[in-house]
Structures are given as C-alpha cells and as structure tokens.
Image (cartoon, rainbow, N blue to C red):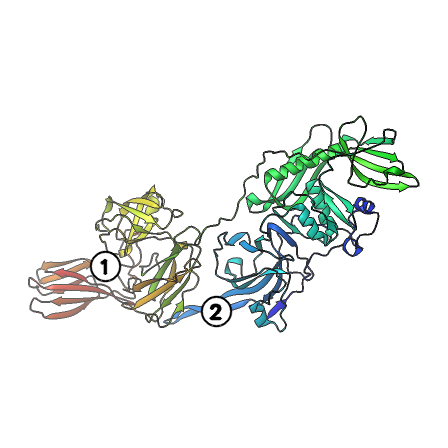
Amino acid sequence: MATLVLTAVGTAIGGPIGGAIGAMLGQQVDRAVFLSPKGRQGPRLSDLRVQTSSYGAAIPRLFGTVRVAGCVIWSTDLIETSHEEGGGKGQPSTTLYDYAASFAVALSTRPIREIRRIWADGNLIRGAAGDWKVSTGFRVHRGDEDQPPDPLIDSLEANPPAHRGLAYVVFEHLPLADFGNRLPSLTFEVVADDEPPSIGAVARDIGGGVMTGDGPVASVPGFAASGDNAGAVIEMLARMCGGWVTPRGGGMALNDRMPATPLPLDADAATRERRSPVEGVARTLAISYYDMARDYQIGVQQVRRAGAGWRDDSIDLPVVLEAATARRLATATMARAERERVTRTVTLDVTALGIAPGDSVAFPRERGAWRVTRASVDGMAVTVELVPAKPAIEVTLAADAGRAVVAPDLPAGQTLIEVAELPPLDDRLATLPEVTVFVAGTTPGWRRAAVLFSRDDGHHWERAGAMAAPAVIGRLATGCGAVGAAVEDRISRIEVTLAHDGMGLSSVTPEALDRGANMALIGDELVQFRDAERIASARWRVSLLWRARRGTAPAAHVAGERFVLIERHAMRVLPMAFTRPGERLRWLASGVGDVAGPVEARLTLDGRSILPLAPIRLRHVDTAQGAQLQWVRRSRLGWRWQDGADVPLGEEREAYRIVTTTPQGGERTEASDRAALSVAALPTGAIVSVRQQGTNGVSPATILEI
C-alpha cells in the first residue's frame, strides 16, 4: 500500500515587505504577491536540515548548491522479507526479518541540475562521485514542466501525479536495517544552477515579476528560499548584501550601490540631525550560516566592536558561505549599524519632488554622500530622511571555519570473502558442521555484502543472513616452515599484506596470548602471534608464534596464502544443516562496489568443526604378555588445560577404532574404550591406524608403522 502526501508545492508568498518599504512604494504593487493577513515568516537556518512529511509543508526554491532535507511526499508501507536460519537434526530454526521502503522526497520548486552526495542519519550513503554505499534503486526528477510520473508511483497509484515543476527523488527498496528499521532522516547536496546565481537574480525569481533590474551582483553559493513570505526573503537578501529596496516603475528594485554622482541639496534647506546612543549598536554580532567547508554544517562567525555597549546580536543566514565571507558580512553589518546611528531629516521645496528613496544626495561644503530612505510630500514641502552612505569596500578578513566531524566519503571497494571450517574456538560442542565466514573490502569505505551459499554446486542458493563487521584479511608476503604445537616458534617471522591500510594488527602481552588473543588463520592452520610491527603501508610483520592451535595441523606456508585475523565481532559462524564431511559448498558475496559481479569462494567440509581430534603419541610397547598399543587422547574441550588434570572427554563416551594391516595385506579391526589396546606381537612392517569414535563421527587417523 502506498501513501500520497499532499504537500504545498511552492513557497507561499505573502505579507507586507515592511513599513519602510511600504512607505517607499507610495502605491500598491501587486498585493496578491506582497500582501497577506498573516505575519511575515522568512527562511530559518534549521529549515534546510529537518526532513518533514507533513501535510501542507512548504517546499523551498533552491539556488546554487545547497544541502537540504526536503519533504517526503509519497511512500509505501514497510516491505518485509523473511528467511530462516539454523534448524536441522532436531534444532529449532530462527525466522529473521528484513525491512525496506520505497518513497519519494520533494526538494525544490525550481528545476535542479543534479544530486551529488546524500546523507542518511548523518552518514553518507552516496558519495561525491555518485557511488552508493548502500544498495537501492534511485531516480531523480529534475522538476521540468513536462516530466512524466515516476514509474514506481505510476504502478502503485490509480492517478499518479507527475509533480511537474517540482524537483524530487525516488528511492526504490532502500534497506532499513542500518537505520533501526525506520525511514532515515535524509539530506541531499543539490545543485540547482550551473553557476552560483547573483543576489539580484535570486530576488527577481522570488519576487515573481515584482522585482526589476539586475540588482546586486554578489553571488550566492547556495540558498534555499523557504518560509511563508517572499518579502521576508528579499529583506534577508537585502540585509545580507547591505542593500535596500526602492520603487521602480510598477515594481521594486533591490540595490546595494549608490549612484556615482549624488544630487546636490540646497544650502539653505532646513536640516535636523539625530545621533542615537552607541549603546544601541550591538557590542558583538554573530552570523550563523551553512559552511561549505564543513559539509554545510552550521558555522558561526563573530565580530566585536570597541567602545561602550551591552547588547549582543545575531543573524541567521540560511545561505551557503565560506567562513571568510561570513566574517566579512558580519564586519560590514556592524560598521553599517554604527554609521547609521546618524540620521538627517531635510525639508525642501517643490523642486525636490523628483527625489526618491535610494537616491544619493550631498550637502554643500561636506564630503561624502547620503542615501534617501524615505520621501514624503506635505503641501508645498518635500521632506526626505537620510542615512550616511559609503561605497562598498571589499575587505579580506581571515576566518577559521573550525574543525568539523564530517562523514567520510570513501569508495566502497570490492568485496573479499574467506570461508573455513574451524574447530570450536571455545568450550562449546557443535552438533552440526559449522562454516565460519569472513567478509571485508579492498578499501576502508567497504561496509557489508550479501552472502549466499549453495549445497548443490550452484543449482539452488540460500541466504546466509546478515554478515558481521569487516574482518582483517590479507595475504602472506613471505612464508615459513612447519613447526609443531609443542614449541614456541621464535624463529619464523611472517610478513602479511592486508587488504588496505585501514586494517591493522597489534602486539599483545603473554597473558593475553595465553587467553587466546591474536589468533589468525594462515592457510588452514590456526596460529597465534605475540608481536606485530607495521613495516609499510598495509604491510605487517608478525613474530613469536604459537603454531597448530586448536588441533589444526602444522604446515609450511608460502607467499600468497590467506591470512585472516580471528575476531569474534568480525566473523559469522553458520551451522550447516543437511551436510556432512566431504561435501562441497559454494559461496557468493556481493556488495555495492562489486560492479563486476559477486565474488566466489569454495569449501569442502572435512569435519573438523564436529569430529574428535586424532589421537597423538601412538606407540608400540613390548610387554611380558606380548605387546600393547598406547596413545594419548585429545579433546575438543579444555584447550587451556587450567587444572593440569586430564582434559574433558567432549564426546558421549570414550571409544576407539584400531585397524592393523600386516605386510602381506591382511587387516584386523578392533575396538577399545581406553587409550590402549593389548595385542599380539606385531611383525615389522605392520601398519596401525587409530581413530577416536566421537558423537558425530570418527576422527582422522593416527598412523604408526612398526
């Protein structure tokens, strides 16, 4: 089921521009645009960052490049999928649920050019290069007047709106697991114009035909015109550029520069000057803005003036700026406030009827010009109100944007997968064959992958469920020889090249090593290392090794073999129901960076996760009664051997199968319930094989040749 949200497309425009501007007009100018019974509400700094889904919410008009949240205007219900994990041999299965959503977000009532980065709950899900960090369908409707309905909305709605003139995006089947199974708060880096527009161009667009002239030429890197009042937006633009609004023909014009030649005033004109106290000017002024150097996070630049005063002031500019520009604006605004403490009122005769607000005038025998802010006629007298005017001076001021914690924009990279059947790594007995899956990526930006497995050589595939955190995976750069588990290998030094430099290893204390730290899978041998040293980018040297851990076989290793650090949080242990030792499994892993297709791994089960270990120290001992075979039992439990006594059995009962083969080819099979067997004297050349009988099968054989 889908939901269509009826949203006010377009910023409602209304309200008087202000008492001063209204007095300047001297006439009504398109009251449908500039007059409304409700109060003026202009853009607010937080408007761009708060995603909404409310009925009647206003959609901004975007200019330049800016980060906005937009408004959800259409969505489906949560899309639920389920799959089962576990089960088999009397074990209960677990049903797991995944959720996704499809929805549309309105961004601008002006056409846009493109969408760059996208954040979800503050984390990047789409990078500047257009690379996705999550798997989702995504379409951009740029707001053209002839755009068709979105195909997904068209397939689910009886009368789908095309939203012509409205720029919006559609997500199709966005996974919600990373966002608490809810729709995340999204923000978008939107490019609305090829080049940053001028303040004058923005004012003309917002004014809807009322604003005329080129206006201020200063550019706006990014701006979202929101709120319920166009007049308030234009007032904010005027304040930002130090400009003013004046009547022009049947409309108005926004200016920030005085005419080059001021009009001379009569020397005998009656003039009254008023100077307000300096305390009326803010002692400090802070301008808040969206800092383009900090991923559009809110920045603040503050200036302070010398002298008396007690009031602090602040201005919110929902505009994308550089820190230096914001500081320059703050300095210019404070200087203008100090300058305009002085005002003059001049009474002139009817010859001054042509003087209008915005004109530049000058007094005889005085330097400098004054700007007309108000002109009125009373009988035969013309009264003008003036403020000092100075030409705009560009001042370059140093400013620090400060440090910001921004979401890293890292490519996803390709997926790496390693699968292995490992012996239990704790005192837990598995009842089903277990496969341990490790996944990672070739870059630090890799996040996760979907993993499938097949028991029948790819004819049918099953989901492996959610994978764990990225593992530390690499390849051996140098090899080493085989050393048994009875000695500490202080000779071998293995060099490892990890998948990327964001992965790392660390040294541990002997006590931590005894508790199982720094265990790695090298080839098929479990090895622990005490010391790790970084010798180059992504290259490490490990030394002081404990070999053949957890009953794995000691082996010689060569360059190119796999290296996987065993960490609980970075591995997924999967019970494999309906499988047995000897079966082959295929695995596929696919992440958002695997444009060439999924990566594959293969594994043949050998039973080491559920079968007992082969006995050790098998020997043939002559006795007075004949001979005896003796060996030492091993267990899947009690690896730390903390009490010094015999290790736990770890099986339902103790039992062994002994097969003796004579040089002539004869074979005899016997059983024993202890780690010894009395036999007749065996001839030279006889071969003895001993296997432990476990709950889930027999161990590998231990061989002795007499």
Q: Which residue is at the front of the view, 179 or 145?
A: 145
Q: Secondary structure at mark 1?
A: loop
Distance (Cα) linking label 2 and label 1: 45 Å
The x and y percentages for residue 405 are 53, 45
Query: Badge 1 local density, few (<14 within 10 Å), some, or many (20+)?
Result: many
Indicate the secondary structure of the residue bearing disc 2: strand
Residue 58: which quarter of the image? bottom right
Residue 52 x %, y %: 64, 58
State the residue position of label 1: 633
Asked whether the viewer can see residue 310, the reply is: no
Instruction: Report the front residue among 257 and 660.
Output: 257
Q: Nearer the viewer, residue 62 or 132?
A: 62
> What quarter of the picture does the N terminus occupy?
bottom right
Q: Residue 476, relative to residue 375: is it above or below?
A: below
Q: Give the left or right position of residue 359, taking residue 67 as reference.
A: right
Give coordinates of residue 64: x percent, y percent: 60, 50
For label 2, the crowd category at 10 Å Cα-Cα, with few meaning under 14, some 14 to 19 and many 20 or more, is: few
Identify the residue at image location x=76%, y=32%. Answer: 369
Q: Position of residue 147 (x, y in %)?
A: 60, 65
Q: Which badge, 2 or 1, is on the more N-terminal residue?
A: 2
Residue located at (41% from left, 59% from top): 594
Can residue 419 be seen from the camera position used here? yes
Point 18% across, 59% down: residue: 631
Q: Which amino acid is tagged 1? A: Arg
- Front of the two marks 2 and 1: 2
In the figure, 283 relative to 299: above or below?
above
Q: Nearer the viewer, residue 451 or 264?
A: 264
Q: Is residue 244 left or right of residue 456?
A: right
Q: In the rendered view of the protein, which quadrant contains the C terminus?
A: bottom left
Q: Amino acid at mark 2?
A: Ser
Residue 82 bears which disc, if any?
2
**Eyeballing the image, is 649 above or below 302?**
below
